[in-house]
Amino acid sequence: MSKGFSKYALLFLLLFLGQNVLGQTEQRTRILLLLDASGSMNNSWNSASPISKMASAKQILTELVDSLNKNPTIEIGLRIYGHLSPLSSRNCQDTRLEVGFSRSSADFIKKKLRNLRPRGITPIAYSLQQAASDFPSTNARNIVILMTDGEESCDGDPCAVARELEAKGIVLKHFVIGVGLEGDFQEAFNCFSGFFEAKNPLSLKSALDNIISRIVNKTTTQVHLLNKKELPEITALPMVFFDHFDHKADYTFYHKLDKNGIPDSLNIDPITDYDLRIYSLPVVQKNKITLTPNEHNTIKLKLLEGSLQPNILGKTLNNNLNNQIKCLMKKQDGTLFHVQDLNTQRKYLSGKYQIELLTLPHKKMELEIKTGELSKVEIPTPGIANIKKPYKFIGDIYLDEKRMKKIYAIQERDGTETVALQPGKYKLVYRIQNARSMHETKTISFEIKSGESILLNL
């Protein structure tokens, strides 16, 4: 056994390589090793480690390929860049798939690594673009492990390539290992699933172990929705795990507690970071959650809730009209996030909200919902205005006030029109649709009382 591969790490891999990721029982995993073979990989790590970066990469990848070859659900491929042309040629298309995916690719990869000699530049973005076509299908966990010791040589943008592939429906999980990089190049790869910095052979080995652990090891996760007592007793809410990098909805659940009040254990693939969205009212989101592979992960979110019940006082003359009245729930900035029926009770996160009741006229107010409390909003029972139209009329109903606030336009048809209005004084301004003059405009002043009906003859 080589010095670069610890007994403990090898045992760790062998214990779990035969196990599938929970929730991915039969799914195939394809891992493309995307290796930098530009001329700078011939350089040593530093004065304390005279071995070249390429020599370390060859040794560690060879041992890794041997280990992965024992897992029947994993296929490995090898694409190399920067090895076909000399540095002087500045070949920005210097990349090639050297070993395609198969269950028997390990020996071919090891042979290719043995004979590999670094030569050229670093066309990372172009290599990533070409790598998308290396995978036989999307019906698998398609993973790219990119190793590079320098930044992009050809003015490419790796993140732009990733977004372009995503737009085409080609979603790959990317891991990037910076091999002895000088300076801070992490920003160039912040759109990928993980960036690991290797300063020496040991940290390169550790980075690869970390990535492979995410890929092959069993992981479970629980989501605890905590109440004001910090107890995980809130449940029955939809929740979605979104990939933090490509924003795809990977897992959707409806939260559930068992008979002992314990949340279900979920089978979430730790291969990427997630944004967890809880569809409470309003929505709560926790971003960039990193799951620890081969462990039970607990995600905690505190949800302080109160309740709201908007009511109509008394009985209405027309239940169909009553059912048309809604309660609009808005955030402080005016963003609408929920529509609630009257005479119902719903839970909301504690906080201050704007409420708009779709009565005629509309009623708006500010309301604070407090944790563990029920807030009630009560509105008077509307009255009914029955507008009898022997001909087709045009007209509007206004609040009877100085500024004549328009609240309703009557329908341009004959017959009787029924309008539910809040108690108060109003004016109906109207004329026959085909009137010859605006002087034929008429005004009716009327008053609506709660729960009563009036008739307006036009």
Image (cartoon, grey):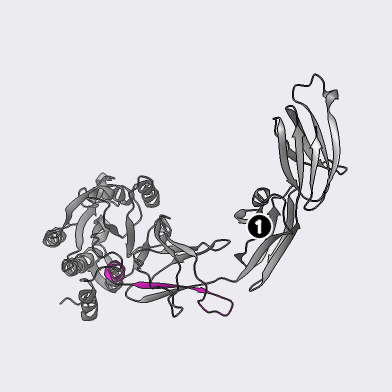
Q: Quadrant of the N terminus?
A: bottom left
Side of 4 relative to 361 (left or right): left
Q: Secondary structure at mark 1?
A: loop
Residue 118 visible in the snapshot: no
Residue 233 visible in the snapshot: yes
What residue did someone put label 1 on?
A: 342
Neighbor class of circle 1 (other Cα within 10 Å; few <14, some 14-19, many 20+) is many
Which residue is farthest right?
402
Q: How many marks?
A: 1
Q: Residue at x 66, y 72 (%)?
A: 373
Q: Nearer the viewer, residue 316 or 263?
A: 316
Q: Nearer the viewer, residue 349 or 134?
A: 349
Q: Is residue 207 above or below residue 119?
A: below
Horizontal and vertical percent position of residue 119: 22, 53
Horizontal and vertical percent position of residue 323: 64, 51
Q: Is residue 92 above or below residue 246?
A: above
Residues shaded magenta: 210-234
Residue 308 is drawn in which quadrant?
A: bottom right
- Magenta residue check for 21: no
Residue 349 is drawn in which quadrant?
A: bottom right
Side of 102 relative to 245 (left or right): left
- Magenta residue check for 226: yes
Side of 142 relative to 420 (left or right): left
Residue 62 is drawn in which quadrant?
A: bottom left
Q: Residue at x 86, y 24 (%)?
A: 439
Q: Quadrant of the C terminus?
A: top right
Horizontal and vertical percent position of residue 327: 66, 55
Callout 1, which amino acid?
Leu
